[in-house]
């Protein structure tokens, strides 16, 4: 039996990312590998197989329409069908993984983490402890704990995903960068500024090398890094890095984006601290204009 790869792209940094869009793309990325997996199954379970597959497909379309409540219910039914193949069947693991993604999009962090952990237990056996699927699910667990502000708990999972991505994909891969950024965000949440700075700088270097300066992912890393510099008292570095992040976010997200507004507002706090009240007022005028428009 040829296992399919879950192909879950790395969960992004807590600043400036569109998780809903990411969930949809991740669920879509499951469909073709899943169909390839189904093609090699014996035909004696055709009816069960078709029932499970159809529910997963319907869940995908519901998620694509931003109807995550329906996607959740369909995946719960699909999980029930998958369990009829046996509690350790890879279809159970893949369905739990998809369910975790949907839970996370609904901000149901506790059930999301539980779904990912159950999926991990199954897929570690089915695909081996060094598979990309296992690396992805470790990353999903760590990132969900990060979203749930469980910073210290997230670190072992994020670090494990970094180690695995580095071995499987290389230290310069974007998945590796996302995991490194996650570690930076966890340290940031714990106010461990030196550790956060180190990880966010490394993440930014990889993203810049891959996509240049003008890309969303690099801009998001710089926005987080500017905040870390600010809190660590490195005001000159914070000022220049906020400016860099603002320029990138204006070009990539747009001048009326909430991502740009968030960075401008954080920068305004630094500018006031530096006694540059006029510059701070300019920033806040644009922030207020963006938020009125929103």
Image (cartoon, grey):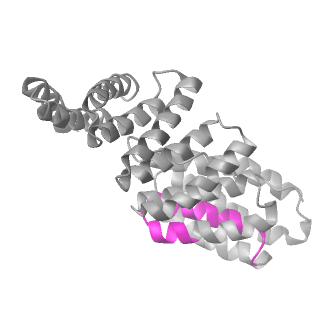
User: Where is residue 106 drawn, in percent x and y?
Assistant: 43, 61
Residue 147 appears in which quarter of the rendering?
bottom left
Residue that appears at 63% across and 52% down: 161
x, y (%) of residue 74? 58, 67
Q: Out of 208 and 12, give the one closest to the viewer.
A: 208
Q: Residue at x 70, y 53 (%)?
A: 6
Residue 104 part of the magenta-drawn span: yes
| Nearer to us in this view, 229 or 93 | 229
For the N terminus, which image quadrant?
A: bottom right
Toward the viewer: 220 or 41?
220
The residue drawn where x is 53% and y is 48% is 11
Relative horizontal placement of residue 224, taking residue 262 as reference (left or right): right
**Is residue 7 visible to us here?**
no
Position above or below: 24 against 112:
above
Magenta region's main secondary structure?
helix
Q: Is residue 41 above or below residue 173?
A: below
User: In this view of the protein, which residue sits in the foreground, 178 or 37?
Assistant: 178
The location of residue 269, given as percent across then percent down, is 17, 37
Horizontal and vertical percent position of residue 14: 41, 48
Range of magenta residues: 87-114
Q: Quadrant of residue 34?
A: bottom right
Quadrant assignment for the C terminus: top left
Is 218 covered by the magenta stretch?
A: no
Q: How many marks?
A: 0
Residue drawn 80% across the image and 60% down it: 127
Q: Look at the image and tell me whether residue 162 can be seen.
A: yes
Q: Is residue 221 left or right of residue 77?
A: left
Question: Compared with residue 294, is residue 103 higher up or lower down, i.e. above or below?
Answer: below
Q: In the rendered view, does 267 fall on the left or right side of 136? A: left
In-image side of 219 versus 56 (left or right): left
């Amino acid at each position: 039996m040829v296992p399919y790869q879950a192909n879950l792209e790395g969960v992004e940094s807590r600043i400036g990312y569109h998780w809903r869009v990411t969930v949809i793309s991740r669920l879509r990325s499951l469909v073709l590998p899943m169909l390839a997996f189904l093609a090699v199954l014996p035909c004696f379970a055709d009816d069960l197989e078709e029932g499970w597959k159809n529910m997963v497909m319907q869940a995908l379309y519901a998620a694509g329409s931003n109807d995550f409540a329906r996607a959740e219910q369909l995946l719960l039914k699909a999980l029930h069908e998958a369990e009829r193949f046996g509690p350790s069947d890879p279809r159970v693991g893949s369905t739990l993984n998809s369910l975790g993604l949907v839970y996370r999009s609904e901000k149901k962090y506790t059930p999301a983490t539980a779904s990912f952990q159950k999926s991990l237990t199954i897929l570690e056996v089915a695909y081996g402890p060094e598979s990309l699927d296992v690396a992805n699910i470790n990353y999903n667990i760590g990132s969900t704990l990060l979203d749930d502000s469980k910073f210290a708990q997230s670190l072992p999972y994020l670090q494990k995903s970094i180690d695995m991505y580095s071995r499987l994909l290389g230290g310069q891969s974007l998945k590796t960068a996302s995991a490194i950024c996650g570690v930076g965000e966890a340290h940031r949440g714990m106010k461990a500024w030196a550790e956060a700075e180190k990880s966010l700088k490394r993440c930014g270097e990889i993203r810049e090398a891959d996509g240049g300066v003008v890309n969303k992912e690099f801009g998001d890393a710089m926005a987080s890094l500017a905040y870390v510099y600010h809190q660590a008292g490195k005001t000159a570095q914070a000022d220049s890095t906020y400016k860099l992040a603002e320029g990138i976010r204006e070009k990539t997200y747009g001048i009326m984006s909430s991502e740009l507004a968030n960075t401008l507002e954080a920068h305004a706090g630094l500018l006031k601290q530096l006694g540059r009240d006029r510059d701070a007022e300019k920033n806040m005028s644009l922030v207020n204009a963006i938020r009125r428009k929103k």
